[in-house]
Amino acid sequence: MTDLDTRAADRPGALRRAAPALLGYAAVRALGLLALTLWSAARDKSAYTLLTARWDSLWYTRVAELGYGYEVRLPNGDVHSNLAFFPLLPWLERLGAAVTPLSYADAGFVVSLLASLAAAWGIFAVAEHLYGRRAGVCAVLLWAVLPVAVVQSMAYSESLFTALAAWSLYAVLTGRWVTAGTLAALAGLTRPVGLAVTAAMWVAAVAPFVRSRSDAVPDGARRPERAPGDGARRVLGMLLAPLGAAGYVLWVGHRTGGGPLGYLDVQAGWRNGFDGGAAFARFVAGKFTSFPGAMAGVGLIVGVALLVWLYVVCVRRRQPLALLVYTGLVVVLALCASSYFGSKPRLLLPAFPLLLPLAVALAELRTRRSALVVGGLAVVSAVYGAFWLNGSGPP
């Protein structure tokens, strides 16, 4: 039986294997939405409005309804243009509104719910492939109970991007290069960090050839044979991967007259840019000017240290190179951008490979103990998510 035949035969059982993870994920997110509904009602707010019609959600629905070209000029001279928002989510919102009675906001909410389930399944697929089914279930549940997991249910692009990234990485791990490249291109149409998926795929595609050239081969020995057409599929996948992000960035540059770097000018209007983490460091340092702020500053430092530690653990446990490259870029771009600092936790949501060492550890516990851990974290996540979205600033 060929590898293709094996995959085809295995496909009907894929959903059955993932079912516990998906059901657990849905239960955790339902708890989070229930907490948000009750908390919002107590504050005389609409939970559904918080999820679909505030902050970035409004920008996406405006793109879906009116197209690009809308901007807001602030008194300080900043220009907030909707060109900063990549097009795949608005396209799907427009499609949903066209084929159903849903509004653009409703369609965005449905897309996010479905995408969050697809992301959970993709995370399960990656974790199961590497560490087994139990670890896959634990990885999905850990992603569901993150403190900012409520964003997974918002009409934002994080869930859609994570779904595309996770399945692209799974395709890389299983040698489906054209699929990986196609999904990477779609991820590039979703968020600027789509370049992390492209970079991960390129490195994974090129690394075996670099190793094969550097490894010594005894006289008379033959190098391992590759499947016919494997090289061509790798190249095609690599060519497809950057098309989404590159196409949109170049289109923005053409539309604004700013050339290839025109998109950076659009981001500068939002005071977004890459400064190596200097602005974030100043933000953290500024917290130590008062006692309550100092506690928050310590929390931020501990959070960053935890991210670094988890990444080091991933390296030491020899995660596949594609995952390491992807995760490293997502974390660096999130922490080292001079963007709104309150959004950094949600920008880290796609960095799910950081959870894999914790998932393996959780999978090694007895079922009752792991259930207690996940249950406790689910309650904390639900309460925090409700508190967070009912705050004044955007997530």
Image (cartoon, helix red, strand yellow):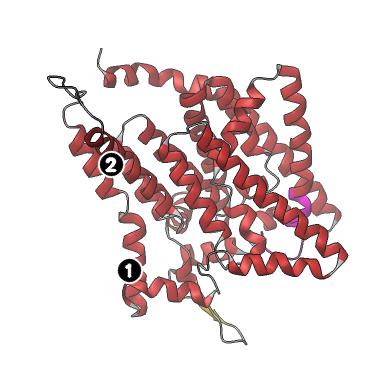
Identify the residue position indicated by label 1 in the image.
251
Q: Quadrant of residue 200?
A: top left
**Residue visible at 63% across and 60% down?**
343
Residue 132 drawn above or below residue 81: above
Is 137 or 36 nearer to us in this picture? 137
Q: With 300 as the anchor, is 241 left or right in this view?
A: left
Location of the N terminus by quadrant is top left
Identify the residue position indicated by label 2 in the image.
206
Mark 2, other Cα within 10 Å: few <14 / some 14–19 / many ≥20: few
Could one spot residue 107 in this view of the protein?
Answer: no
Mark 2 element type: helix
Residue 194 drawn above or below residue 263: above
Mark 1, other Cα within 10 Å: few <14 / some 14–19 / many ≥20: some
**Residue visible at 32% across and 44% down?**
181
Tell me which label, 2 or 1, sits earlier in the chain. Answer: 2
Could one spot residue 183 in this view of the protein?
Answer: yes
